[in-house]
Image (cartoon, coloured by chain):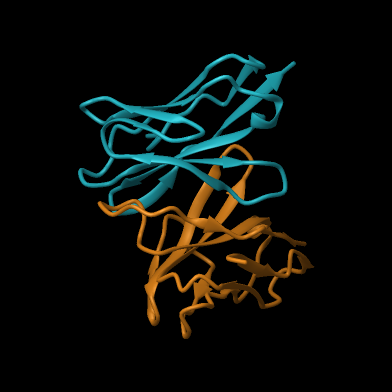
Amino acid sequence: LAKTTQPISMDSYEGQEVNITCSHNNIATNDYITWYQQFPSQGPRFIIQGYKTKVTNEVASLFIPADRKSSTLSLPRVSLSDTAVYYCLVGVGGKLIFGQGTELSVKP
Amino acid sequence: EAQVTQNPRYLITVTGKKLTVTCSQNMNHEYMSWYRQDPGLGLRQIYYSMNVEVTDKGDVPEGYKVSRKEKRNFPLILESPSPNQTSLYFCASSLSPPPGLDGDEQFFGPGTRLTVL
């Protein structure tokens, strides 16, 4: 049974808004939800983190429904440089669990 | 510059030959962790450490050992590597343990690509 689920890949065009959803049915009650971005040949890099409702920073927004069983990373007006793999990270049963990653391809 | 460093960046070895991958951070972080990344499986946590002399198993600890004798260093040891440990390994550190109530972002190293023949 998958602990977290994300779409494997998504395509978008420059200037569009992209929403990537992660399902995490068994998230620990007190744990935050974190999203990371990874470029080829690099380690993941922190994007945004939240516990509930909505969080926004200079690069993204994170929407978390009341039941916290999923979360949606929103990237406004993507550019070519946003082409990367995006991972959600949650705590499940005392373990840190990354999603399988969503490969986002932004086209001109 | 605040960073996590790993060495070596690339390593090819043979089955059964003990190896160590070093990890060091200069941010005075208490939490350190090792992950492996495999195609289709994403990142999986191997071991983590809350502080000096405090280590615990992650999701996939079999075949690995770690130690935390100093705050800045967290080496990953493969006593008898096998081909199924061929993978891309990342070390990470954070000020506090993720993703708890005080959740903190993890800083990742550049990765070590290991091939076991």
Q: In which quadrant will I find the C terminus of chain B?
A: bottom right
Q: Position of residue A45 (x, y in %)?
A: 56, 47
Q: Position of residue B6 (x, y in %)?
A: 65, 68
Residue A78 against residue A45 in the figure, above or below: above
Q: Is residue B16 left or right of residue A98?
A: right
Q: Is residue B113 left or right of residue A15?
A: right
Residue B80 against residue A8 in the figure, above or below: below
Residue B43 against residue A105 in the figure, above or below: below
Write down the quadrant of residue B49 in the picture.
bottom left
Q: Is residue B43 left or right of residue A62?
A: right
Residue A72 against residue B30 in the figure, above or below: above
Chain letter of the cyan region? A
Residue name at image x 26 percent, y 31 percent: A68
Write down the quadrant of residue A34 in the picture.
top left
Q: Position of residue B82 (x, y in %)?
A: 66, 64
Residue name at image x 69 percent, y 31 percent: A81
Number of labels in the image equals 0
Q: Position of residue B109 (x, y in %)?
A: 61, 60
Q: Residue furthest bottom?
A: B69
The answer to which of A104 and B41 lies nearer the viewer is: A104
Chain B color in figure: orange
Residue name at image x 52 percent, y 21 percent: A76
The answer to which of A54 and B79 lies nearer the viewer is: A54
Q: Is residue B110 left or right of residue A59?
A: right
Q: In which quadrant will I find the N terminus of chain B?
A: bottom right
